Amino acid sequence: MVINDENTFRRIRTPFYYYDMPLLEQTADTVAELCRRYDIHVHYAVKANYGRRVMEVLSSRGFGADCVSGNEVVRAFECGFQPSRIMFTGVGKTDAEMAAGLRLGIQAFNVESMEELAVLDGLAERMGVVAHVGLRINPGIEAHTHKYIVTAHVDSKFGFSLLDEEEIIETVQKLNQTEGITVEGLHAHIGSQIFDQQAFVEEIRKMFAFAAKLKEVYGIDVSGINLGGGFAALYTDEDKPIPVPQVCETILSTCREENEKAGGFIKRILIEPGRSIVAEAGYNLYTIGYI
């Protein structure tokens, strides 16, 4: 739909969201090509926009999906995302949501606590399946964004804190004794609308250092590191978001450097962009009543 005249506006009830689909497709193609070039797996953060047409464009480019509710998992599947490319993150997953993910055979659950792991293990055992998990780590990083969307500072409620390393080790050792769960890797998400590349560099260094320690000191192998998302989008003229290609280049070069230091045992790097892919293609349209 092209909106370029007053008569078209008069036929449409506002407010509504309008998406520039050619721009969205161009952005999706750019991100997909970058991730292929740099061998980074990209999972679209569904919470950014779960509109069917938007999600179908992204699933058609081979993206995975990062979901934070059971309904988002179902929506991703309905919009063409392969179950083997669907991640289920989030703090309050219900038993029913986890069971649905297990039945669907999703790629992994990013888990936040021992309590959640115990429930997931029990469900998987009763269903006769294995749950693949990523341990969500709170690396204790200040991402220099709005205080309400920071998720990895020291006092954050999200994930296992690196400050409590003993808890993480105890958790992984217990997991190695269970039949219902296998640990795929480590996950972190340090916030949203992040303009400072250095925050991602610090996150990568901390995550690789901890993965290396798990391997060298405790004999625990993790094959993948999920760095989350949080790449900024342009909302106002004052915003200075880092271009996605530049973010990918920074992530790749830092990951390669850290992986070489650790002996190259990390085989898979994942990112979870959301708003940086869809936001700039979207418009929220209103009818002005009074000035």
Image (spheres, rainbow, N blue to C red):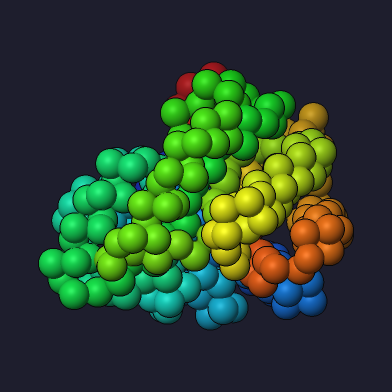
> Residue at horizontal 40%, vertical 66%?
182
Residue 272 x/y as whole percent: 58, 56
Q: Nearer the viewer, residue 247 or 99?
A: 99
Residue furthest left in the image = 126
* Residue 45 visible to the viewer: yes
Say above or below: 232 vs 288: below
> Residue at horizontal 59%, vertical 78%?
61
Say above or below: 103 vs 119: below
> Residue at horizontal 50%, vertical 36%?
166
> Residue at horizontal 77%, vertical 59%?
262
* Residue 281 visible to the viewer: no
Q: Nearer the viewer, residue 191 or 257?
A: 257
Residue 100 x/y as whole percent: 22, 65
The quadrant of the image that shows the C terminus is top right
Q: Nearer the viewer, residue 252 or 64?
A: 252
Residue 253 x/y as whole percent: 86, 59
Q: Nearer the viewer, residue 15 or 219?
A: 219
Give the quadrant of residue 43: bottom right
Residue 273 x/y as whole percent: 61, 55
What is the count of numbered marks?
0
Question: Seen in the image, is 163 located left or right of residue 51?
Answer: right
Say above or below: 285 vs 154: below
Question: Seen in the image, is 259 located left or right of residue 214?
Answer: right
Give the quadrant of residue 144: top right
